[in-house]
Image (cartoon, rainbow, N blue to C red):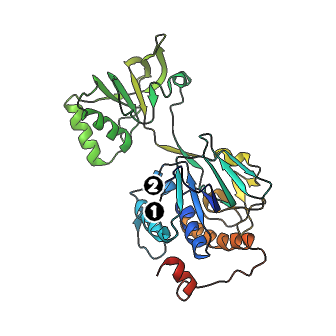
Amino acid sequence: MPPSTASTSPQTDVAILGAGPAGLFQVFELGLLGITAQLVDVLPDPGGQCMALYADKPIYDIPGLPFCTGRELIERLMQQIKPFAPQFHGGHQIRKLLQDTNGLWQLSTDQGFQLKARCVVIAAGVGAFVQRRLQVPALDAWRDKQVFSEIPSSIQSQHIVVVGSHNEAIQACLDLTQRSHPPQSITLLHRREILDADSDLQQLFKSACDAQKIQFKLGQVTDVRVNPQRMTHLQIATPEGQVESLAVDLLIEKLGMSPKLGPIAQWGLAMDRKQLQVDTQTFATQSSGIFAIGDVIGYPGKKKLILSAFHEAALAAYGIAQYLHPDETIPFEYTTASARIHQRLGV
């Protein structure tokens, strides 16, 4: 899927907010009807919740597949939509959604990215996935200076602390040990002895700890110590109820991803219990030209299943086609027999 570039067309038939299974399959259903789409997601790559939460865990309720991982499902969906060459804009969370005098929806982010569309499909799942942060107010002044979610490309820090317990946290510590000039100290900080990483990574981590390349410390950050120019130490509350000081030049937060509904809640769309309300014949919201599918919506009998989102995407595609061409009859065609669909698929 082509990434977002400066030359990318600023206008499309449909802008799809969310590039998880629902958003990707929406591209396919729209493509069958000859409707172009572009995808926008806060994550840098397509996949949504499938990739953020269970990329390598098995899924057993996808029709026709006895089981597949989240990663495999996304790869299959990406292959399926390839004939329609949709543009993907990763790393963008839409902040504003406004309709201009020509009826086009204008989408914009804080970073200055803009996209115009005749229709919008909100396929945001349970929300935009953002990095979890330590809830320690004293750290806020040092974010993007000494506190990061990723290790900066060039570092001269002597004391690096990584907070977390999953694969990403363990891998970050191991990667630091492999640098040509490793830091003076690498510490993994977690509140419990039990780690949530894969067994092979845990074994590598244990070996690095045994070789005194990494220190594993139990505790939680409660405060920081600073001099006028920088953060120098973390204040740690240990499981035994003691308070300790830990030297730090660079703090890396590897706490996983958390979904947040974000700006969608401020767009004036009808909601009930943080779920968008839709017409289940077309999956249109009460705002003309805005549709919604997947876990972000609610209706009587709704089940938060991927297969439900696929069904919703199919009906939404016909609703969108009728919205875009109100004076036309939208034909229903089978992929097994339609020459027009075969041409669009390149088969």
- Pick whichever, 272 or 263, lies toward us: 263
Q: Are marks 1 and 2 in contact (CB under 8 Å)?
A: yes
| Residue bearing mark 2 | 51
Position above or below: 304 against 255 = below
- Pick whichever, 236 or 239, lies toward us: 236
- Position in image of residue 173 (x %, y %): 31, 35
Kindly identify the residue that appears in the image at 45 percent across and 35 percent down: 149
- Position in image of residue 218 (x %, y %): 37, 28
Outermost residue toward the top in this view = 228
- Image-based side of 26 in relation to 240, left or right: right
Position above or below: 41 against 31 = above
Position above or below: 192 against 339 = above
| Residue bearing mark 1 | 74
* Res. 211 in view: yes
Instruction: Specify the amino acid type for callout 1.
Output: Ile
Name the image quarter holding residue 276: bottom right
- Position in image of residue 257 (x %, y %): 49, 44
The dot on residue 272 is: none
Instruction: Specify the amino acid type for callout 2.
Output: Met
- How far apart marks 1 and 2 lie (CA) works out to 8 Å
Name the image quarter holding residue 178: top left
- Image-based side of 272 in relation to 60, left or right: right
- Position in image of residue 73 (x %, y %): 44, 65
